Amino acid sequence: MTGRDGLMLVGAVLLCLAVGAVGGLATASSVRDWYPTLVKPSFNPPAWVFGPVWTTLYVMMGVSAFLVWRQRRHDLRWKPATLAFAVQLLLNALWSPAFFGLRWPEAGLVVIMLLWIAIVVTIALQRRVSTPAAVLMLPYLAWVSFATVLNASLTWLN
């Protein structure tokens, strides 16, 4: 790995973590005074689970994006895979403001369903460029699948 590769890897991971941090800002006050008032399904995880899970997923996403970018000289399909990644990252960034910022579970549900689709497309496009990149996105897809069911349950119960 070259010095430039190292910088790109760190940059990709930091970008993904920054999206998480922005989501955290939208979430902070609602987690204290609004979210606790919602009726939650029995499978709702404890609050302490979300931080470590999301941090791990954002790091994996950053590495995944880097692995695709690294193939830019060998495979022109890196561009659509990177565009799809950017779209899903944007949708990821929009979910917390929709659900927590607006305190509107229905809006969150629409965003997270679009996010789920975008992740599936991203994985399919990444797989053509870098199988390890696509594999790194699978836990994220699993977590967002769970989060979609959780969001739908919160919408239904409230």
Image (cartoon, rainbow, N blue to C red):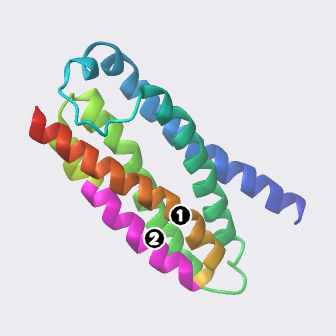
Q: Residue furthest front?
A: 42
Determine crowd level at label 1: few under 14, some 14-19, many 20+ residues with C-alpha closer than 10 A: many
Q: Percent position (x, y) of residue 93?
A: 40, 44
What SS does tag 1 mark?
helix
The span shown in magenta is: 113-128
In the rendered structure, which disc, 1 or 2, sits on the residue that comes first in sequence? 2
> On the picture, is 46 further left or further right than 10?
left
**Amino acid type of disc 1?**
Met
Q: Which mark is residue 122?
A: 2
Who's the residue at 22% across and 29% down the image? 102
Above or below for 155 versus 64: above
Whether the magenta-drawn stretch holds residue 51 is answered as: no
Q: Is residue 74 above or below residue 3?
A: below
How far separated are the C-alphas under marks 1 and 2?
Answer: 9 Å
Outermost residue, top side? 33
Give the residue displayed 31% in from the left and 40% down from the top: 43
Where does residue 14 sit, x and y in percent of width and height? 65, 44
Asked whether the residues under the numbered discs 1 and 2 touch, taking CB atoms below 8 Å apart as contact, a structural biologist would say: yes
- In the image, which is nearer the foreground, mark 1 or mark 2? 1
Dot label at residue 137: 1
**Residue at the image position 48 percent from the left and 56 percent from the top:** 140
- Tell me the element at label 2: helix
Residue 28, image quadrant: top left
Q: Main secondary structure of the magenta part?
A: helix
Any part of residue 80 in sight: no
State which quarter of the image contains the N terminus. bottom right
